[in-house]
Image: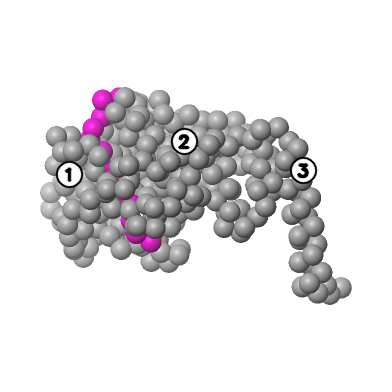
Amino acid sequence: MRVGRGVLGVAAGLIMAALATVGYTLPPPFDPSPLTVDPAFRTLPPQPAHELRPVSATAPVSVREVTVPARGTTLEATIRAPLTPGRHPALVFVQGAGPGVRNEFDAQAEWLARAGVVTLVYDKRTVGYDFRHRDFGLLADDALRMLAQLRGRADVDPARTGLWGVSEGSWVVPIAASRSADVGFAVLVSAPNVSPVRQVSWALGEQLDRLHAPSGVRELLIRAMSAVDMNFLRHDGVPALRGTRQPVLALYGTRDPSIPFVESSQTLTRALAEGGNSAYTIRYLEGADHGMRVHGGPFAPGYLETLANWVRGLPGTADPAAPPLRFTALPAHRRRHPGPALRGQ
């Protein structure tokens, strides 16, 4: 049966109106009031040139497949190492939400290895992890087991072995870092730092605003999110951030609709300060999306260079004697607009 676009449009409009009406009748949502833009985000200095200097990623590399025992399962991993003499910094990639197959990180793991950083990518566990139930502490234990694989290598500098976590992985990495001094540094990519339900509510509101949905629809769906019974949605990542004593590099994309990065940055800096850690750097990469790519394609300009230069330059690149608020300039349109794009919900 064929239905004309006009009929579908009318039907969609009626559904939206009905949802809007229902939305206004439900109890208050889990939807904190909008944040004003912090003055620090209005006067951000440009990123230092040394962080963006060209990186030669041409070294030959070795590739080794390993099987790592974990709690209740075993995990497959791939280690890439530069075939250059000496000890190198090393990095474990910790996945975001979902199945987390290791080849998701192959491109940047290969590039970093050719730039002089030993890398490990691994398949995320399926035992004890699913859509409704996930234990970030268990995932942190997996990450530490992977880190131990690198620290035992003769070509790795154990003082410069760290964890890289994206999105959900950025709730996992601070737990691992707060548990073990073996974590030499932490890289947090697109890190919400707020609770999962708060982050999802913000992302949902952002998308509905972009679709110009009636505010009642937005209220209804965010209330529905608040009622979802998933054990991990109320996870509070702040205690682990307070316990993170290692150098931290946090990277955000200015085209990421999933993260309230103003509030995320504020939460991060506040928690680290409360824990006495001033060795952190925060960068906002122009045009980058949630995965540090441009529209899901190539990596955003400066991302790989920033990552490699920071990791290879440790401990100097995390000198706590430097000013603690190390931000890259935010594009003017994101600084001026206090609406949905900078709303902290």
Left/right placement of residue 50 relative to residue 287 reads left
Residue 280 sits in which quadrant? top left
Element at label 1: helix
Q: Are circles 3 and 1 on residues that touch, CB within 8 Å?
A: no
Q: Which residues are magenta?
A: 275-288
Element at label 2: loop
Residue 277 within the segment the image draws in magenta: yes
Would you name the residue on which mark 3 appears?
22
Would you name the residue on which mark 1 appears?
317
Instruction: Check disc 1: other Cα within 10 Å, few if <14, some if 14-19, many if 20+.
Output: some
Whole-number angstrom distance, CA of label 2 to CA of label 1: 26 Å
Precedes in sequence: disc 3 or disc 2: 3
Q: Amino acid at mark 1?
A: Thr
Q: Nearer the viewer, residue 150 or 172?
A: 172
Precedes in sequence: disc 2 or disc 1: 2
Residue 8 within the segment the image draws in magenta: no
Residue 234 sits in which quadrant? top right
